Image (tube, helix red, strand yellow):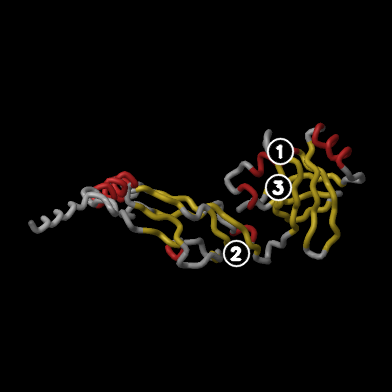
Amino acid sequence: MADVKLIAHRRTDAGKGPAGRSRREGLVPAVVYGLQDENVPVTVGARELGAILSSGSGANTLITLTIDGREQLALARQIQRNPVKGTLLHVDFVRVRADQTIQADVPVRLTGDAEGVARGGVLEQLLHTVGVEALPADVPHALEIDISELTIGGSVRVADLRPPAGVVVRNEPDAVVAQISAPRVAEVAAEGVEGEGAPAEGEGAAAAPAESPES
């Protein structure tokens, strides 16, 4: 995964007031930390950072930050957005080294048309992301798994994923990624058939005829 370049400018003031002014100027307040180096408060261009985060690799994009003429590799983490507008409010940049593995979450994408769905089954994806460990440049955009042969009652698990060389999936191998369930309509119909003609407790039993009194 090729890295992208982003210029960051040191911040000399802190607080809500300066942060708000930065945002109005099209900048995102941020902090750079990690690798036993100093924490550096910075601002970066909102448009440039937004383009990076909306790319195929998203938050796992390897970024070359330039601060005071010095370049350092980093990943965007702890991304805060306005809950209504979705605009970027703050981000942490974690320094990384190209020769040291990192941990990241990557999306799981299902490919193919499942046989079970064609027969009326319901596809359920239980895991949309998995954790991986790899060198920063080797973190995949996503992991794909083919579900074409998945039938009703069948499932695919983490162990069925095929990550690229050098990428280790950290989730439990038996964790279910996706499964095909029987259609709910059929289940409801089956329940109705099973219950048909079965009287509720205390109802429907014929009363025993009263014994005739001896005359």
Alpha-carbon span between mark 1 and mark 3: 10 Å
Q: Residue drawn 76% across and 50% down?
A: 65
5 or 21: nearer the eye?
21
Alpha-carbon span between mark 2 and mark 1: 30 Å
What amino acid type is highlighted by mark number 2? Glu
Q: Secondary structure at mark 3?
A: strand
Q: Position of residue 196 (x, y in %)?
A: 23, 48
Residue that label 3 marks = 79
What amino acid type is highlighted by mark number 3? Ile
8 or 191: nearer the eye?
191
- Comparing marks 3 and 2, which lies closer to the viewer? 3
Q: Position of residue 45 (x, y in %)?
A: 76, 39
Q: Secondary structure at mark 2?
A: strand
32 or 87: nearer the eye?
87
Residue that label 1 marks = 82
Q: Dots 2 and 1: beta carbons under 8 Å?
A: no
- Residue 150 occupies quadrant: bottom left
User: In the displayed structure, does residue 196 sit left or right of residue 157?
Assistant: left
